[in-house]
Amino acid sequence: MYILIELVGIFFFAVAGSLMAARRGFDILGSAFLGGVCGLGGGVVRDLILNESPATFEHPIYFVPPVLAALCVYAFTPAVQKLHRLVQLFDAAGLGLFCVTGTMKALEHQFNPVTAVLLGVITSVGGGLMRDVISNVTPDLFNPRDIYALAAMVGSGLTVIAWHAGFMSVGLGAGIAGLAFLIRVLSLRFGWSVPLAAGHWHRAKQNPPAPDGPQRHF
Amino acid sequence: MYILIELVGIFFFAVAGSLMAARRGFDILGSAFLGGVCGLGGGVVRDLILNESPATFEHPIYFVPPVLAALCVYAFTPAVQKLHRLVQLFDAAGLGLFCVTGTMKALEHQFNPVTAVLLGVITSVGGGLMRDVISNVTPDLFNPRDIYALAAMVGSGLTVIAWHAGFMSVGLGAGIAGLAFLIRVLSLRFGWSVPLAAGHWHRAKQNPPAPDGPQRHF
Amino acid sequence: MYILIELVGIFFFAVAGSLMAARRGFDILGSAFLGGVCGLGGGVVRDLILNESPATFEHPIYFVPPVLAALCVYAFTPAVQKLHRLVQLFDAAGLGLFCVTGTMKALEHQFNPVTAVLLGVITSVGGGLMRDVISNVTPDLFNPRDIYALAAMVGSGLTVIAWHAGFMSVGLGAGIAGLAFLIRVLSLRFGWSVPLAAGHWHRAKQNPPAPDGPQRHF
């Protein structure tokens, strides 16, 4: 059951990675690789921090979702203009699932609540961060026009509370994941955001967002 | 005592990370995250190489400096033109402290002198490198117009010599850290540098440095 | 013997890293650092995944090739126009050797064939990926105009087959490494490639590749 949920989350992130590869004009192997990094990267970093051999490399089944994602994106490439939005949508789905499963794994390792929340956030934002960094674009995580890390924090925080209160269940976990997903997606739709790093700079002075569409740098 | 010095070094690097977030127009959560990566990244990499669970994730106190740094930068944002210089100044302070503490930790693990120097350098340049890489700017480490890695090497080298000679003390460590800091800052002020990677290219032909100020890529 | 082959592979990758440093206008310490990351990065990641202390940091001899490479590039800097091609050539030589040695190491750790191939590919593409990411350029791995990951996959796959069939030898390993090298180099020469991530986009519509030559971003 746990493995199944994890595989679904990996698939969502892998699709986001493969869509990013399409957006940047990479080839299909780069697509599978970027999907793999995006889907598995957060979990690998979490396992390295927990000082255990990454589960990913024990069971070949973990590599099925990235391959599947690359094939799906190859078969059903969306129109160029929709690519950035679709990356964000699948990324949000993965974010929701991973902030719950990442936090659960940290709690099972007896970490204190603060660290458990942080590990949950790292698991859920790590894959997307790696995808953006190795694609050579500024990470979505830092985009000041919507909510990203906060959605993961809410999901991880609620997971810690539910776990310590003793009523964590699959249904509740799914609900928390859905809530984190919703916060992220609604923030994209309605432009919710948190304050800028620099307190007294006016938002109004910021440049408009870069236009969507494929960026090709070769 | 050791922990206190480490926390001060983390704070310096975290301020450098949060100032970079301000320079790039990120939001305040991105600022705390980037401060955390910059302040804790070098130490986490060192601990992974030493094959032990990163100390950072055992004690939640390590996460206080990044949060504090993000709040400080939010409250006292400097003028845009000063941001790059301030990033470099706080980065230099962290560099000085970390090349001493990183080398000490490697020496305590019985590493040979060469590896101890290298681990010290990795600890002290790793955080800043990660900050620049995930912010999608060319790392300061590679800037050919000033001295960066050499300052860390001098600090780490002197730490190894003092340790093996048997007269390492808190005062001497602080002195070495101060020296590394000074080398870095004076090289920025007076344009000290080491030769280019490509031997026979003339420096005079290089382009001028990019103007400072916030770069916004969204 | 095994160590010697590994050192040769590290040297090839380190030259590729130092040439990239020359291309980007970095200084000679940045050149040694980038050579070290490129030469040793893939192996360190593989060892972290295998959950053992990276061999690199046990024996200082592993740091000799990057220093040597930086000195060679300093002494014999090629003309600017040839830099990108030379980076790719040395990178291909390292790729060939590492996909064999990386896969062998995974097989010695009793990994299943699929994971062994993947670890071999990660070892052989990891260093070049890190080099490109920290130099702030789009990784060569993703370039849709030639074959990169596929060459490593062929090399790793043949290594797994030869190992399980029981006739792996130094000569055969060298042959497989040479084959992977050839595939990569011929794909560069003749423009072999795999399909794009996005199935129905026409290749003809892609922008021309960026002109070679040093990119200076400071």
Image: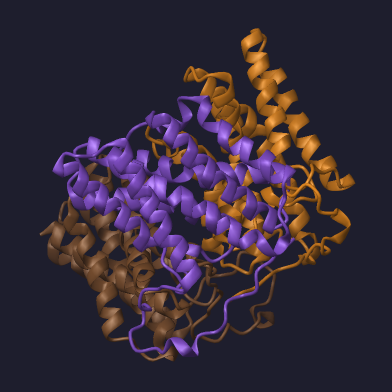
Chain colours: A purple, B brown, C orange
Whether A120 is drawn above or below B196: the answer is: above
Q: Nearer the viewer, residue A106 or A94?
A: A94
Q: Residue at x 36, y 51 (%)?
A: A122
- The image quadrant where one finds the N terminus of chain A is top left
Q: Nearer the viewer, residue B199 or B56?
A: B56
Q: Nearer the viewer, residue C69 or B40?
A: B40
Q: Position of residue A99 (x, y in %)?
A: 36, 48
Mark yes or no: residue A151 visible: yes
Residue furthest out toward the top? C166
Whether A184 is drawn above or below A205: the answer is: above
Left or right? Give the position of C93 relative to C113: right
Displayed quadrant of residue B180: bottom left
Left or right? Give the position of A218 relative to B91: right
Q: Residue at x 57, y 77 (%)?
A: A209
Total marks in image:
0
Q: Residue at x 51, y 63 (%)?
A: A139
Mark yes or no: residue C64 visible: no
Left or right? Give the position of C18 relative to A76: left
Q: Residue at x 66, y 41 (%)?
A: A70
- The image quadrant where one finds the C terminus of chain A is bottom right
Q: Position of residue B204 (x, y in %)?
A: 66, 83
Q: Position of residue C176 (x, y in %)?
A: 73, 25
Left or right? Give the position of A214 relative to B129: right
Q: Position of residue C54 (x, y in %)?
A: 42, 36
